[in-house]
Image (cartoon, helix red, strand yellow):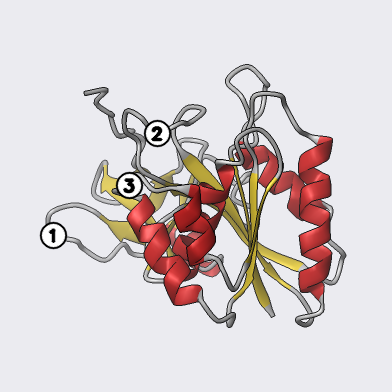
Amino acid sequence: MRFYIAFDDTDTLDCGRGTGKLARWFTEELPRECITWGVVRQQLLHAPGIPMTSHNSSLCCVVDAPDASYRQLFIEQGPKHIARHFFEGSDPGFCVAGETDPGMDELIAFGIKCTHTKVTQAEAMEAARHIHLSGHGGSNDGIIGAAAAVGLTHFGESGRLVEYRDIRTLPTLITAEELRRRGISPVSVNRHAEFIPGNHTIDTQDSLRPHLNGKRLIVPLLATGNTSWKTIDERKAYSEE
């Protein structure tokens, strides 16, 4: 059974690590029979008046377990994991849901809302009323991002994979065929949206992070030559107005 296990607001600006690392560390502590499909970073609304450490993102671990009985293990293990790594000044939230749980449609709608509107803890709790959602310190504001991360990741139309198979150990240059072999589709974002042949070379810029789109993994690429491509490295600039 597939589970979505999310964390948010577990860090501070000077703590030396982000929620991404905490989520990845959590998957390393799972029972051997549980398989981590990936860890997805979801970007939520970045705007004045919204409390955030830096970028207002949250992380969701996608885990395949032998059966539904593992739900309780995850619910118990998550808060213990947060407590071990807790930093004063953080406001951790934690969410666990199975892919067939009732109420997932409400959680998807809530997650989408979080990408463009400021929401409240009460709205998060209402959206997750059929799903485990809990706060573990500070203001507990992290429940908002944790709930949103589960909904958005289950929906499968947004997010960036920060952990997936061997993406962190791939060489700088890799072929399109090698990406497809890993279940990742290279996608041209040039005007003509051309197909990228298997023997074409891709410069990962030492940071290959596939996107979740249409419930499949893609890597948006820009052409740098007739048979060469590179990943997109520009970041969105946020206005403080």
Label tally: 3
**35 vs 123: above or below:** below
Q: Is residue 157 above or below residue 166?
A: below
Res. 199 in view: no
Residue in the foreground of this view, choosing between 140 and 113: 140
Q: Quadrant of residue 152?
A: bottom left
Residue 84's spot in the image, x, y percent? 84, 37
Residue at image mark 3: 228
Give amino acid for label 3: Ser
Q: Secondary structure at mark 3?
A: strand
Q: Residue at x 40, y 50 (%)?
A: 201
Front label number (3 vs 1): 1
Identify the residue shown where x is 30% and y is 34%.
Answer: 236
Q: Is 90 placed above or below 73 here?
A: above
Q: Position of residue 238 (x, y in %)?
A: 28, 29
Q: Which residue is mark 1?
A: 192
> Residue at 52% across / 28% down in the picture?
53
Amino acid type, callout 1? His
Whichever of callouts 2 and 3 sits on the residue coming sooner in the sequence is: 2
Determine the residue located farthest toward the top in the rendered image.
14
User: Are the residues at dot 2 and dot 3 in contact (C-beta closer than 8 Å)?
Assistant: no
- Callout 1: 10 Å neighbours few (<14), some, many (20+)? few
Q: Secondary structure at mark 2?
A: loop
Q: Amino acid at mark 2?
A: Ile
Give the CA distance from mark 3 to mark 1.
16 Å
Q: Which mark is residue 141?
A: none
Structural distance between the alpha carbons of marks 2 and 3: 41 Å
| Residue tagged 2 | 50
